[in-house]
Image (cartoon, grey):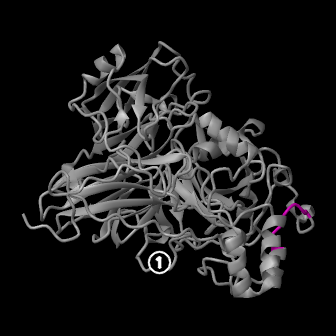
Amino acid sequence: MKRPSDVSLAPVGLGRRYFVQGLAAGGVLLGLSAYGRQAFAQADSKQRTGTAPVLRGIEFDLVVSEVPVNFTGTPGIATAINGSVPAPTLRWKEGDTVTIRVTNRLRESTSIHWHGIILPYQMDGVPGVSFAGIGPGETFTYRFKVEQSGTYWYHSHSGMQELTGMYGAIIIDPLDASNDIRADRDFVVQLSDWTDEDPMRVLMKLRTQSNYYNFNQPTAVDFARDVRRYGMAKAVDMRKMWNEMRMSPTDLSDLSAMAATFLTNGMTPAGNWTGLFKRGEKIRLRFINSAGNTFYDVRIPGLKLKIVQVDGVNIEPVTVDEFRFGPGETFDVLVEPKNDAYTIFAQTMDRTGYARGTLAVQQGLSAPVPELEKAEWLTMADMMGDMGGMDHGSGGMQGMDHSKMQVMNHGSMATMDHNKMAGMNHGAMAMDHSQHSMGSGNPLAKASGKVRHARTEYGPSTDMRVDMPRTNLDDPGIGLRNNGRRVLTLADLHTIGGPMDPRGAEREIELHLTGNMERYSWSLDGLEFGKSSPVHFNYGERLRVILHNDTMMTHPMHLHGMWSELEKPSGEFQARRHVIPIQPAQRVSFLVTADAIGRWVWHCHLMFHMDMGMFREVVVS
């Protein structure tokens, strides 16, 4: 067999380089419990990691239990389903009614949420909202009709169980096979993150020191570089600015490789999950980001990526070199490899580690693994939004005009005129802009551009408010700008067939994504979940939601039970999503048809942010 010179049969090193690459043969250990063995026996595969077992049909029995694992050389305990990490892949068919019996063998309550699936709210699986949860020893039966097709996933919505392994893929075949995307091979590529630490201990450390795991902090070397580049006075001024804001330009991720190991289909980078193909075949890769707290930037050096489906919905194909996706998002990609081996390279947004897999014509082959790229610092545009005339792609602070920082409101209410906000609900509810429809013309033809900070944003839970947000969708985000590669953006996504509902917005609500980095507090409109009251949607209405990010981090926002139809700033339909990532200082809008009566939730899919309060209940009535 002819092999290109860059293909190696050498085993992957097991040692630590820049981050923990894990064990080549790590994962779920032998010695399963009786429950685990019984449940695992239902699967049609003998593997428990690397490629999850596949379960097909309309009736399923899933058993949740603890299993011993070792991904990094440090033994741990995972929360597994049927003894597998990831959990079994479930294959459904559109139009079928599925019955799933979930038995809890843990010592604590559990749950399963069917992410992105349109179903009755009682089947949504969020403890305390849509049902009571599944107590120890109990079995809960989920039953619902499958109304859609595509790539989805499922995970626990209880505690930190998702971060400890309780996640799996769902593939739904379309009722009409002619509507399926044709490929010779079809692989799930499920990315996740694993920490040997107790996730609650990780959270406690973040609450004590929010940058505990950030080892890209500005250093004395960086300061010396700034002095050489800008002069002492300006370098001091820049450092003083960040200190006064109690922020860091490297706050890109909470959970770096200092605490996490990054997995592909339950395998570490050293383990190197491999998908086999024959030369000349077309391969469908179903990328699912099941990480608890990690954004990945995915590319396959040497291959173009044709994106054909996003969040389970077919889009007009777009060919790129790279895409970024956050927890909860799914991207289906077609590739046509010509060589013997390619690396699936998914580096983390903060550039501290990567998940890795291989496409190869033979087991044991591998291709070069790219070096991690250097982390970029947040720019003023990331922090302040539309600065008009600033270089948004500079990747640093060069050319920054500090005088423009006056538009950013860090605790002062001076710029806010409360007299002009009469009639607005500034309590625990999202702001309702329905009064806009009473004006002349059609004021709801596009999203309101007027920024309104709720009164509740002026408290200790909010350390930053953006008054001049960015609204453009064509920005790939920090670290991906001007890198020489064609990177997917929200502006590239166009759902085939257009919106589900031709109606325009009848009402508009605005929610701000807020936080206090110093206190590690996350919220919506300055209110953590426990202090908030539900957002109300009127059954049958078509409404616009505006999400306005007043923080320095990107948040993947997930609305349960209903589709989020992303729109352009001009008000035209863009794409149907179940998760929408909102970049720092960005303002994004989407339309929702409130066609699902019941109690739903809406939250950031970064687990620690959700757990600390960036979470709301939504009531459709």
What residue appears at the point 69 percent right and 67 percent down from the top-left corner? Answer: 218
What residue appears at the point 77 percent right and 80 percent down from the top-left corner? Answer: 235
What residue appears at the point 61 percent right and 69 percent down from the top-left corner? Answer: 445
Q: Is residue 232 left or right of residue 100?
A: right
Q: Is residue 60 left or right of residue 242?
A: left
**Count of numbered marks:** 1
Closer-to-camera residue (206/334): 206
Query: Range of the magenta residues?
Result: 407-413
Q: Which residue is mark 1?
A: 483
Circle 1 packing at 10 Å, graded few (<14), some (14-19), many (20+), is: few
**x and y percentages locating residue 27 in the rendered image:** 36, 36
Is residue 129 magenta-colored? no
| Quadrant containing the C terminus in the rendered view | top right
**For the stretch drawn in magenta, what is the main secondary structure?**
loop
**x and y percentages locating residue 274 in the rendered image:** 25, 51
Query: Secondary structure beneath disc 1?
Result: loop
Q: Is residue 594 left or right of residue 43?
A: right
Compared with 565, 113 (above or below) is above
Q: Is residue 304 visible?
A: yes
Q: Is residue 100 left or right of residue 394?
A: left
Q: Residue furthest left?
A: 1
**x and y percentages locating residue 186 in the rendered image:** 23, 51
**x and y percentages locating residue 433 in the rendered image:** 73, 58
Name the amino acid, label 1: Asn
Q: Residue furthest front?
A: 15
Compared with 345, 289 (above or below) is above
Q: Is residue 535 visible?
A: no
| Quadrant containing the N terminus in the rendered view | bottom left
